[in-house]
Image (tube, rainbow, N blue to C red):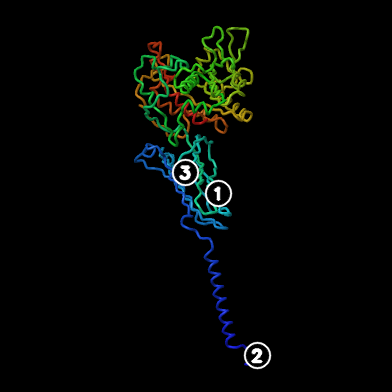
Amino acid sequence: MKGGLKVSQISLILIGFVCATVLLLAYVKSLFLSSPVLPQNHVLQLSPDLKVKDEEALVEGSGLGQSEESVNLVSEKYSTYTNSSPAIKVTEELISHDKEALGEGGGSGQVEESVNFESEKYSTYTNSSPVIKVSEELSTREEIGGGAPNFTKKGDLKDVSDKKIGSIKQQTDVSTPVSSGGEHSKNLTTTLKRQGCRFAKGRWVVDDSRPLYSGFGCKQWLSSMWACRLTQRTDFEYEKLRWRPKDCQMDEFTGVKFLKRMQNKTLAFIGDSLGRQQFQSLMCMITGGKDRPNVLDVGHEYGLVQSRGSARPDGWAYRFPDTKTTILYYWSASLCDLTPINPSDPATDYAMHLDRPPAFLSHFLPKFDVVVLNTGHHWNRGKLKANRWVMYVNGVPNTNRKMATIGGAKNFTIHSIVNWMNSQLPKHPHLKAFYRSISPRHFFNGEWNTGGTCDNTTPLSEGKEVLQDESSDPDAAAAVRGTAVKLLDITALSQLRDEGHISRYSIKATPGVQDCLHWCLPGVPDTWNEILFAQL
């Protein structure tokens, strides 16, 4: 046809169209193939199996059933990816073997300790560096305890610190940066914060590496009346026992670690003769019972010097020069401020101000970094009469009938001193305060002056475990509840150790008189200090 297309031209057009179509299809296919793909080596699975390392903790209560507390973090839905961000699947199982969490205490029902991990919402991944925020809500009925274990990606225990009373909401951040090259991150870290250890709950176990110091040594710090190795006592199995908390491991005590932790700090024990035992125990533990001529007596800095006519000073203070760590004890059996009613009369009575802290404590508190308070066994009519103590409140003799009883006055004083200490903590941010629960007595068949005895020499004849969650000293527990003052709860674990007292093996060995109040050293007070060390 004239003016139309020739056959050869139409063929060329068709060939060009086909080629263009092929090229277009190839281009679309290449775009599809080049879209982000999740290679197998980019799917990360994190499944640490966090189990109790203590073999006995895994098998104790055999036949009574086990409590498995499984926490599964499964990411099934993923966010929008930009660039080449790989998908991440996180699965974490936490297994706990706590019989009492299942209500095996009998009749108390099942305690629910639920851990809810919400993993429905994720961050937007950009530049191949995804971060997953996983919120954890942990609710427990456990009143007092210690530590939030931190775990590495392999589930290894990193650290144990203290926890607060009641239900706590915590967060777990699983931060997993991935390099733009698609390689596994070497800095993968999983931090799992959860409720930690209640040190007062656990069991006594035999440990042949104990004691921490020799009962024949430590003469520089230990009163001979409490060194049972120097008496006629011949059984010393009580020295081989170590306290093992149920829910975690305590940091092993060494003098070097203690001094490093307390570098440039001062620890003060304020209390009765049981507080003095704890003070002497700690000095022996720090030094391993060895003489340390370089340790400085700094009692004069605190007015702790022996006055004329006194059997001993009101306390002692020693400083380790290498770390500038100071350990002191001040005798205040009632934790009250004592003032002479008639200063000009040598035979005057003393006002024991139930609502005022000891003047020593209030005066030197700014110099302290750790304070451990205790009272209890001087609260009886005989002691008050012998010491000529008269109860005062608001600067005048007490007229409140509820506080006229010994128990009422003691409880009022404990609450008073704890509340006062709690009010001081905001003024001294560096300060940590503890109230130590009462040390149990073990007089059987009478009192100390009426033939009471504690002749048992078989360790743990009354049992070896403490499984209760509540303290055996309800007054102390109630006083610290809701405050920043921590409870150093040693009552129940010490109750199992009736063989650890001085008993009839005193230096004087007075017939018919036994000391079932104070402890042999080395002995039970060493454990009090190990728990204190774990909570610092």
Q: Are marks 2 and 1 in contact (CB under 8 Å)?
A: no
Q: Which mark is residue 112?
A: 3
Q: CA distance from mark 1 to mark 3?
A: 25 Å
Residue in view at x 53 percent, y 38 percent: 166
Q: Secondary structure at mark 1?
A: strand
Closer to us: 340 or 435: 435
Callout 2: helix, strand or loop? Answer: loop
Query: Where residue 446 sits: x, y (%)?
Result: 40, 17
Q: Using the image, determine if residue 471 lies above or below residue 506.
A: below
Q: Earlier in the sequence, mark 1 or mark 3?
A: 3
Q: Are the residues tagged 2 and 3 within 8 Å (C-beta)? A: no
Would residue 164 appear left or right of 216 to someone viewing this image?
A: right
Residue type highlighted by circle 2: Gly
Q: Residues within 10 Å of mark 3 (few under 14, many from 20)?
A: few
Label whose residue precedes the other's in the sequence (2 or 1): 2
Amino acid tagged 1:
Lys
Number of the label disc, if any, that sits on residue 133:
1
